[in-house]
Image (spheres, rainbow, N blue to C red):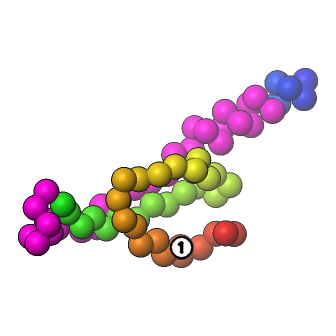
Amino acid sequence: MILALACLVSGTLVAQEAKVTELLSKDLTKFPGKEGLMITVEYPPGSSDLIHRHNAHAFVYMLGGDR
């Protein structure tokens, strides 16, 4: 029963997706083929994102959360 409950809880956490909203996109004229992109990412309470990488530079500002 504990295993079944654990599967249900983990399935619920995975089902909650982050909401990504694009705020600004601008071509960088001094760097052909490159753009600046500003987004917000909102995670539902109790959810998180796996560690991942982007082939880009990023500036991150966290507005809330426990980390």
- Viewport quadrant of the N terminus: top right
Circle 1 crowding by C-alpha within 10 Å: few under 14, some 14–19, many from 20: few
Query: Residue 32 at what x, y percent from top left?
Result: 10, 61
Q: Is residue 52 positioned above or below 7 on the image? A: below
Looking at the rendered structure, the kind of residue marked 1 is: Met
Of residue 64 and residue 29, the one placed in the foreground of this image is: 29
Where, by quadrant of the figure, is residue 19 drawn? bottom left
Query: Residue 47 at what x, y percent from top left?
Result: 63, 52
Secondary structure under the numbered disc 1 in the rendered image: loop
* Residue named by callout 1: 62
Residue at 11% over, 72% down: 30
Total labels: the figure holds 1
Residue at 18% over, 60% down: 34
- Viewport quadrant of the C terminus: bottom right
Left or right of 19 in this view: 66:
right
Left or right of 30 in this view: 65:
right
- In magenta segment, residue 9: yes
Left or right of 36 in this view: 51:
right
Where, by quadrant of the figure, is residue 56 drawn? bottom left
Q: Is residue 15 positioned above or below 36 on the image? A: above
Left or right of 14 in this view: 52:
left
Query: Which residues are drawn in magenta?
Result: 6-33
Which residue is situated farthest in the right direction here? 1
Query: Residue 55 at what x, y percent from top left?
Result: 36, 53
- In magenta segment, residue 53: no
Residue at 81% over, 33% down: 6
